[in-house]
Image: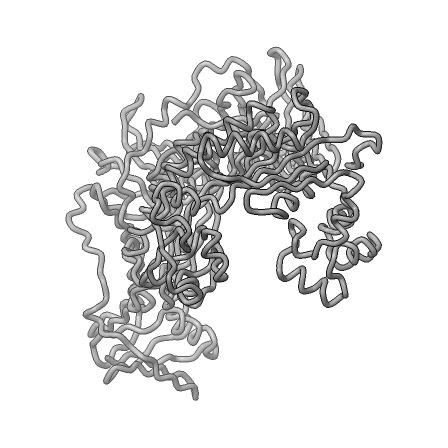
Amino acid sequence: MKATIERAVLLKSLGHVQSVVERRNTIPILSNVLIEAVEGGGIKLMATDLDLQIVETVEAQVEQAGATTVSAHTLFDIVRKLPEGSQVSLEAAEGKMAVNAGRARFNLSTLPRDDFPVIAEGDLPTVFEIPAATLREIVDKTRFAISTEETRYYLNGIFFHVTDDDQPVLKAAATDGHRLARFTLPRPDGAEGMPDVIIPRKCIAELRKMLDELDGTVEIALSDSKVRFGLGTAVMTSKLIDGTFPDYNRVIPTGNDKLLKIDPRSFEEGVDRVATIATEKTRAVKMALDTDKITLSVTSPENGTASEEVAGQYGSDGFEIGFNARYLLDILGQVQGDAIEVHLADAAAPTLIRENDKASALYVLMPMRV
Amino acid sequence: MNTDPPENAPLRKIIHIDMDAFYASVEQRDNPELRGKPVAVGGSSGRGVVAAASYEARQFGVRSAMPSVTAKRRCPDLIFVRARFDIYRAVSNQIRAIFRSYTDLVEPLSLDEAYLDVTDYRKLPTATAVAEEIRERIEEATGLTASAGVSYNKFIAKIASDQNKPNGICVVTPKQGPAFVARLPVRRFHGIGPKTAEKMKRMGIETGADLGAQSLEFLQANFGKSARYYYRAARGMDDRQVKPDRVRKSLGAERTYGQDLKTREAMVAKLADVADVVWERAQKSESFGRTVTLKLRYADFETPTRARSLPEPVASRDELLAVGTALLDTLIPDQRGVRLLGLTMSGFGVAEDADGETETAQFGLEL
């Protein structure tokens, strides 16, 4: 194999694939990136952790086709330190890969490409497209609620499913048992008959990074066990979480009769301010509702007390309810507009937050006992 | 906060009862052939340790927690007997029933020892008489002997029970207390281990009297948090209460393996066995903790632990194992083999923070 590639192009692409590679690996080859030079077709870089793989094709001058694997993090670090604007030549022979740029010479150990594991995609019968901007929004408005509790592994991802409400829709939902985030969009063409899937957290995180640099549309192809994202020059393939996502609809309250309308920015800023003195452990903010105002307060045994009044529209009976400040801020950080609806029932019941009944995003938050 | 008891607090009567070479004595009781012979309870194989040694074995220098190999070297005729914890537990229940016939203030420290506060027991004139009666009743009911320490606080009672072992009693009155403590080597103080004792020795502190001669400031400068306890203990003062039904703080089990475990598969399989044991014990005592701690010992004896707290108590043996395995995965792969694995559950009951205040509780979605 012999190819020459621009440093900036190689660096960007390695940046994408190397973050899939785990720092600690039992299987040595999983630390490596597969580099394949295709005659007249540039080079392909590929990394995997056996659950998630990214393949990116970049332009390069290929003199001799071939493939090898080298340590992804080492190569990434090397390329990062090479002079800007340099041309990097990669040449593999006899168990080594030479990396040359300017006057710098590296000779890296390799492992045979045939040992490199490739995720077998199998048949991916459902194929549809989503604008990159929409996919970004879906991820941003739901991923913060993904559970990190490994014992409830089926919550460690975003659940995607299609259903017929008034019209056919695609829904994405995530929950950690304390809060739930759901995003709804019209069902894209081709998504009909899609199996319910749970896309794992790591795939979501890597996907989100790639989406930053992408305009246009993303092609999504999936079966009940794999998903593949076509992201311009990159293709990301992930196994899905093999589990059943709970029927989350039953925790979305429909009969909450106390409605607070409030400016999300002043609400967010108020919560953020009073939470300054909340201890890392509890993070509880008390919210006292009264006619057309709420009073946010925090009492910390160590630090003292804080309170702030925020104006809002509220006409039901006054009462007090507590929330984890971080959970509130996660949600408020994702809502736009100048008013949001907070539908409450009582101090121990699920609370519904949304911009309005037309909004794509909906949040359910459980209170804290304060 | 002032934790001193009022100086005119009524004098308490505390008894510490400690069974004599408990496990080994049970074995000798049940197997006449073992009587009068050096017996060790525990595994004799490569990495076994002595869980208990009979008095005959102790004469050879065999001690509990000693590696079986060492014990065998010190006492070549040592007879190893496998531990029968269900029997020990049954005997333990017998003696606790006896304790409870005198007072509800019984604080078991293990299967074979407990503190009793008999201040309010009026049927016998002295705590000494109570202790003697308890020792008689234990021997009658179980055929085993116990030693007792009788004094006015837990600290002295515990040391006293060791004073005339086996089958003995030692009474330390409030008047004798300070002199009794003054003569003690500091190593005998509860909470002073070999390292602290060594540090104290370098400072010329070897007895209770030496310790009592130090100012609180000096002790605080050198021993930090424990200073106040040392200062008071050296004066024979200890106001800790006898806490009935001690709230369990943790529950766990660990196993040492004859051969180092090399693969993840082998470790997970062994961890599953440990999880079985811990779960069984949790179910028996109906104690389910929210925090799971994994302990692991590499072949070079480095022994890291990793813990994770869950929002809810561990709900099943499988969940316990899943959390344990996840913690294990943070410590492996590692080229060193693994020779010990342990799992502990803690964080029982109502969540409390360090100040003992009830944590504000997050409600959960009913998913």
In the depicted view, which residue is nearer to us: A217 or A31? A31
Q: Residue at x 72, y 36 (%)?
A: B152
In the depicted view, which residue is nearer to us: A321 or A14? A321
Left or right: A87 as drawn, with respect to B61: left
Left or right: A367 as drawn, with respect to B141: right
Q: Position of residue A74 (x, y in %)?
A: 40, 73
Left or right: B60 as drawn, with respect to A126: right
Quarter of the picture containing the C terminus of chain B is top left
Protein image colouring: one colour
In the depicted view, which residue is nearer to us: A229 or B308? B308
Q: Is B155 above or below relative to B286?
A: below
- Number of dots carrying numbers: 0
Q: Position of residue A51 (x, y in %)?
A: 29, 53
Q: Quadrant for residue A91, please give it.
A: bottom left
Left or right: A246 as drawn, with respect to B183: left
Q: Position of residue A71 (x, y in %)?
A: 35, 72
The single residue placed furthest to the left in the displayed view is A123
Q: Does residue A294 show up?
A: no
Q: Position of residue B298 (x, y in %)?
A: 41, 63
Q: Residue at x 63, y 16 (%)?
A: A319
Q: Does residue B119 show up?
A: yes
Quarter of the picture containing the N terminus of chain B is top right
In the depicted view, which residue is nearer to us: B344 or A250? B344
Q: Is B334 above or below relative to B115?
A: below
